[in-house]
Image (cartoon, rainbow, N blue to C red):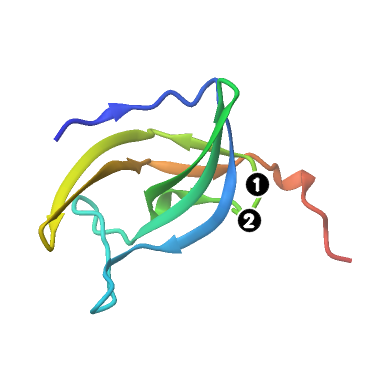
Amino acid sequence: MRTIPVDTSAASVMVAKPPQIKVKDRRTGEIAVDVESGAKLMTVDVMFAANEEVEILSVTVPEPGISGELMMGTPVAVTGLIARPWENEFNGQKRHGIAFRAVAVTSLVAAAEKPRAA
């Protein structure tokens, strides 16, 4: 299937919703894993602002690719972001969309900037 690289260099990206475990099958609760590494997959919703437009993207990332505290509003770098169009049929209805996948989502908040506990 075709993958399209997404250039994030001119965008502002921040966490809209902290990382969540990606569930492969909601009926059984089966957790999605990366087919190459076997790592658990996570989803991170990010606010992607570029060209005077803002979108919320749900990005799938292997768990080891998530670093730093990713709380709502945290500015992040998204490494290796790709878009992959998809289409399926369920109960006779066709559905389609774009899935986003990244190698890593990393907090841009330096450790020195975090408030220290007293």
Q: Position of residue 6 (x, y in %)?
A: 38, 27
Q: Quadrant of residue 18 in the image?
A: bottom right
Q: Residues within 10 Å of mark 2 (few under 14, many from 20)?
A: some
What SS does tag 2 mark? loop
Q: CA distance from mark 1 to mark 2?
A: 6 Å
Q: Provide the residue designation for mark 2.
A: 71
Residue drawn at x 59%, y 53% as measured from the top left: 70
* Quadrant including the N terminus: top left
Q: Position of residue 14 (x, y in %)?
A: 60, 42
Front residue of this view, candidates 93 and 46: 93
Circle 1/circle 2 CB separation < 8 Å: yes
Side (left or right) of 36 relative to 115: left
Q: Looking at numbered disc 2 in the image, what kind of residue is underneath it?
A: Met
Q: Provide the residue designation for mark 1.
A: 74
Q: Quadrant of residue 98 in the image?
A: top left
Q: Position of residue 5 (x, y in %)?
A: 33, 26
What SS does tag 1 mark? loop
Q: Residues within 10 Å of mark 1 (few under 14, many from 20)?
A: some
Q: Looking at numbered disc 1 in the image, what kind of residue is underneath it?
A: Thr
Residue drawn at x 53%, y 50% as measured from the top left: 67
